[in-house]
């Protein structure tokens, strides 16, 4: 009888160990921000980062800028408003292709909202007349004012876009062509 | 008129208790060298019974100009609904100006949200008590934990 009890306890202990050792799915995603300096207003839960701001939002987004305003998440647990300004550079990894989209702009505004089952999650890039926002692909670059990345739908929305195709090295006579000589 | 001695004692005890309670609600700031001091501020009415912020230190030594050299600074911030602190700021050392409600240091600082969703470190800071404002001057690193199931929870 004692052996049976011992076996039962051993099995129960093993199960408990198995449960504690089982890998648990992460419930939180860590967004990291580094900068030269920062101002926190703890009354309104807002942070402003200044100088060499670098953001890593795994697994798909990295961003650099000179000024960043973040409304810190409350009980809902999700960032809702983020504004980046001055020399904004964002690298977005496309979910489907795995390619990196390189976006540059003067300003970027992240907005997130949840209404019932509908999630709106966008980043709106804006620039100025001589320097509209642009997204660079390996073969071409698209400029658009504004340029909107719909994160929920995983795609870009353009307005009066211009597409600039990159000249490939093959057009100069193939990969074996000698380099251009200036003199 | 006959005076009951037990009633006098009770009244005296009540008076001492009320004075002590009133003193506890005032900010307690060290005059000389002090250990384990704290300074508490409360919300505006009608929540004036609730602590808004507690600034404490393991040691405080007086400096010229009415300043204090505080070791192991800790600032606990509360909201109106929580009994426990929601944000804790810690620094190994700082200079505290009690009248202005300003703390500053060229040293390290750590800010933690007790729910684990925010962690900030940096070097060199200025804390303004009245505005709940914190400026970190150098090497700021922030980690924000975003609830990746927030969408699903909100949809339910």
Image (tube, coloured by chain):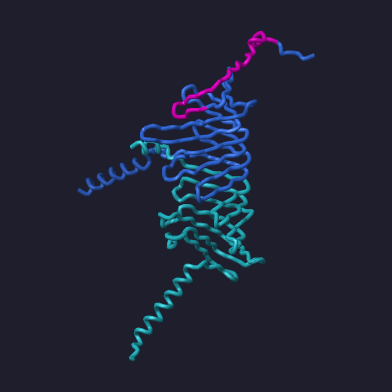
Chain colours: A blue, B cyan
Residue A118 occupies quadrant: top left
- Residue, x 55% and y 25% (percent of image)? A101
Q: Position of residue A8 (x, y in %)?
A: 25, 45
Q: What number of labels is visible?
A: 0
Q: x%, y% of residue B45? A: 44, 60
**Which residue in the rendered view is the most extreme toward the left?**
A1
Q: Position of residue A30 (x, y in %)?
A: 48, 39
The residue positioned farthest toward the bottom in the image shown = B1
Where, quadrant-wise, is the C terminus of chain A in this rendering? top right
Residue B8 higher or lower than A64, as above or below:
below
Q: Judge by depth and name the residue closer to the eye, A69 or A182.
A: A69
Q: Residue at horizontal 44%, vertical 62%?
A: B48
Q: Quadrant of residue B152?
A: top left
Residue placed most toward the observer, B48 or A182: B48
Horizontal relation, residue B100 to residue A18: left or right: right
Whether residue B132 appears in magenta in the rendering, the answer is no
* x and y percentages locating residue A127 in the rendered image: 60, 29
Asked if A123 appears above or below B111 in the picture, the reply is above
Taking the spot 44% from the left edge, 29% from the top edge, the residue there is A152
Most extreme residue toward the right is: A183
Could you tell whether B65 is left or right of B133 in the image?
A: right
**Residue B90 against residue A118 in the figure, above or below:** below
* Range shown magenta: A148-177
Q: Is residue A129 left or right of residue A92?
A: right
Magenta segment includes A164: yes
Task: Determine the residue positioned at 28% across, 44% down.
Answer: A12
């Amino acid at each position: 009888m004692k052996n049976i009890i011992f076996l039962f306890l051993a099995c129960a202990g093993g199960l408990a160990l198995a449960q504690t050792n089982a890998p648990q799915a992460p419930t939180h995603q860590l967004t990291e921000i580094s900068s030269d300096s920062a101002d926190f207003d703890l009354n309104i839960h807002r942070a402003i980062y200044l100088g060499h701001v670098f953001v890593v939002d795994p697994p798909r987004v990295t961003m650099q800028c000179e000024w960043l305003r973040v409304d810190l998440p409350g009980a809902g647990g999700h960032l809702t408003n983020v504004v980046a300004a001055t020399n904004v550079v964002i690298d977005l990894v496309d979910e489907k292709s795995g390619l990196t989209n390189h976006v540059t702009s003067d300003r970027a505004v992240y907005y997130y909202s949840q209404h019932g089952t509908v999630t709106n999650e966008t980043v709106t890039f804006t620039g100025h007349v001589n320097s509209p926002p642009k997204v660079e692909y390996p073969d071409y670059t698209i400029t658009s004012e504004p340029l909107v990345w719909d994160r929920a739908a995983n795609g870009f929305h353009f307005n009066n876009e211009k597409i600039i195709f990159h000249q490939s090295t093959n057009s100069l006579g193939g990969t074996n062509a000698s380099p251009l000589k200036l003199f | 008129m006959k005076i009951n001695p037990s009633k006098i004692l009770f009244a005296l005890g009540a008076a001492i208790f009320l004075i002590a309670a009133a003193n506890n609600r005032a900010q307690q700031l060290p005059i000389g060298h002090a250990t384990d001091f704290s300074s508490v501020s409360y919300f505006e009415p009608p929540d004036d019974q609730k602590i808004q912020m507690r600034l404490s230190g393991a040691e405080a030594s007086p400096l010229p100009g009415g300043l204090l050299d505080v070791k192991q600074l800790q600032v606990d911030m509360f909201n109106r609904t929580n009994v426990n602190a929601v944000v804790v700021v810690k620094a190994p050392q700082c200079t505290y100006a009690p009248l202005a409600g300003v703390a500053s240091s060229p040293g390290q600082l750590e800010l933690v949200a007790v729910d684990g969703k925010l962690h900030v470190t940096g070097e060199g800071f200025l804390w303004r008590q009245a505005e709940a404002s914190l400026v970190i001057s150098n090497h700021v690193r922030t980690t924000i934990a975003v609830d990746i199931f927030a969408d699903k929870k909100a949809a339910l």
